[in-house]
Amino acid sequence: MKKLNIILVVLFTLMSVNSYSQTPLSGSINLGMNVPMSTFGDVYKGGLSGEAGLFYSIPNTGIDLTLTIGYNGFKYKNDYFTGLVNTNLGVGVSTFPFDWSATVIPIMVGARYKFPAGGVKPYISGELGLHMMSFSDRFNGAQIIGNSSNPTTFQFNGTTESGSETGFGMAFGAGVEISVAPKIALDLGAKYNYGGVIYSKSYNVFRNNNSQFTTTELKNTSFVTIRGGVVISF
């Protein structure tokens, strides 16, 4: 009887370890698009979005600890600047030949909760970390001077720069995992992203003493990502 009890304990322990070892780690990769919001959406338009993630499942809780790194591409809206000039100075801009881009790379840690629902598991998530934003070009804060003989042209030499900003970031998301094979699931989700970075410096646009304006500094990016991909359990 004593030997039987020992065998049962050993078998139970091995089953528990084996069950746990099959589930604690999983990884994901997904692709989609981002949609800038608020004033960030006035200055930039969205583009490609991608993310890779590593998840550590806490047994019997439905909670995953998460580590993610993302990529988000954006394009500068040229009509944002030309619209400011038209609104404040009452003239158009004949030449604004730029094709600026920016990227945001979030590196985040957090948690997500998966609702127990068989092969289709909805989840919610929350994350904190860093948002690293880089610019191919942007205005550097120098004065932008208009041509006195042609009010629709401006001098841009020396007024632009490449650069980067890093700030606090957070995100809230929701989605669903759909099991398609042992240890493989489709992942469909959306996430709201916030980053405490400056994406437009203040600058002055000058034609003459009676025709000029100064922009305000713009910070705190916000955008929504919509992605789909795959999750693989190790």
Image (spheres, grey):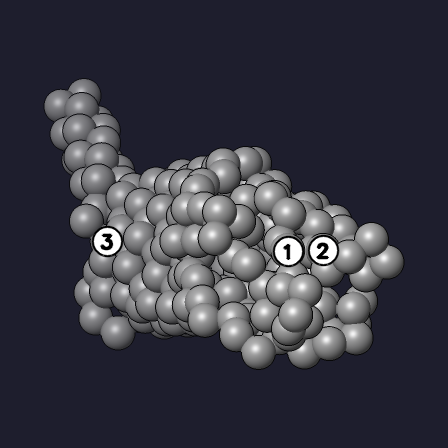
Q: 158 or 113: nearer the eye?
A: 158
Give percent across and percent down for residue 56.
Answer: 34, 41
For marks 3 and 1 on the same chain, the one whose residue lies earlier in the sequence? 1
The CA span between labels 3 and 1 is: 58 Å
- Does residue 87 appear to the left or right of 159 in the view shown? right
Q: Is residue 121 visible?
A: no
In the rendered image, the vertical position of residue 142 relative to residue 187, given as above or below: above
Q: Residues within 10 Å of mark 3 (few under 14, many from 20)?
A: some
Q: Pinpoint residue 127: horizontal percent, then vertical percent.
A: 52, 43
Residue 207 drawn at (x, y percent): 73, 60
Above or below for 212 versus 127: below
Q: Which of the pair 15/134 is nearer the observer?
A: 134
3 vs 1, front mark? 1
Q: Which mark is residue 206?
A: 2
Residue 204 in the figure: left or right of residue 51: right
- Is the Cβ of the residue at disc 1 closer than 8 Å to that at disc 2? yes
Which of the pair 56/163 is nearer the observer? 163
Determine the residue positioned at 52% across, 71% down: 96
From the top left corner, tell me how far across and down residue 169 is, in percent: 55, 41
Q: Among all residues in the image, which is located at the extreme right?
A: 210
Which comes before the other along the chain, label 1 or label 2?
Answer: 1
Residue of label 1 = 145
